[in-house]
Amino acid sequence: MGLSFLHGENKELVIDSSRDGHRENVTTAAQAMTIPFEDAATPQFAEIYDEYFSFVFRLTRRLGVAEPSLEDATQDVFIVVHRRLGDFENRSSVKTWLYGITRRVAKDYRRRSSRKEQGIVPTDGLISNTKGPEQEAAQREAAQILQSLLESIEPGRREIFVLAEMEQMTVPEIAETLSINLNTTYSRLRVARTEFEKAVARHLAAMEKQS
C-alpha cells in the first residue's frame, strides 16, 4: 500500500493506503539532470535512465543522503549503471539491481558526510501535494509524524516495510535485494506492519487526549 498523511482540522491522522496514495516528488532541477558522459545514451541505458530516475532519486533520499547531495548521488548511481550494464544478465529485476547499487552509493555518501543517523527514511513526497502556508505547515507536521512512526519500527524491518509499502517492491524482490531468506522477509514485513499500526494507534490516542 502507498502511504500518505494529512493532519486535518480535527487532528485526525489520515492514512491513504491505496496505490494512488503513493506520490513522487522529484525536484525540477533533478529532473533536468543530463547524463554526465558522452556515450551513455545507448538505447538500453536511456530506457533505464528515463524509467527509473525518479525511483533512484527517491531512494537516495530515503536511504539518508543529505539534500544538497541528492543530485550528485543519483548521477553516481547511473554512472555505475552505465559501467556495469554489460554485466547485468537479467538474473534479477532492473529495480532490484538498481536498489542494490543505490544502497551502496547512499552508504558511501553517508560515510563521507559523517552522517550518524542510520535507517532514516525522509518523508518528502509521501504527503498530499497542497499549496499555501497553512497547508505547507500541515505537510511539514505530517512528514514529522510519519518519520516518527517509521522510527518506531526496528531498523532491519523498517527497510523492508519502506520497500514494500512505499516503493511497491514485491517480497521476493526485497528478499533478493537484501539477501534475506524469503520466509524471513515475509515474517519481518508482517511484524513491521504490526509495529507501524500500533505506532499509529498510539499517536491517535495521544491526539485524542490532547483534544
Image: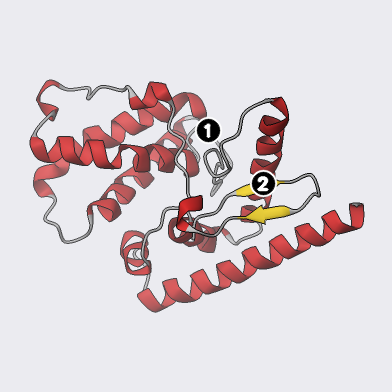
Q: Residues within 10 Å of mark 2 (few under 14, many from 20)?
A: many
* Image point (13%, 29%), residue name: 40
Q: In this figure, which residue is indicated by the disc labeled 1?
A: 114
As drawn, is 45 to the left or to the right of 49? left
Of the image marks 1 and 2, the number of the one nearer the N terminus: 2
Question: Secondary structure under badge 2?
Answer: strand
Residue 78 is situated, as x and y percent measured from the top left of the image, at: 25, 35
Q: What colour scheme does the image use?
A: secondary structure
Can the viewer see residue 83 in this picture? Answer: no
* Image point (11%, 41%), residue name: 44
Q: Is residue 170 above or below residue 8?
A: below
Q: Residues within 10 Å of mark 1 (few under 14, many from 20)?
A: few
The amino acid marked with disc number 1 is Ser
Residue 17 is situated, as x and y percent measured from the top left of the image, at: 54, 59
Please name whichever residue, 192 or 52, is drawn nearer the observer in this view of the structure.
52
Q: Residue 6's mark?
A: 2
Residue that lies at the very extreme toward the bottom in this rendered image: 183
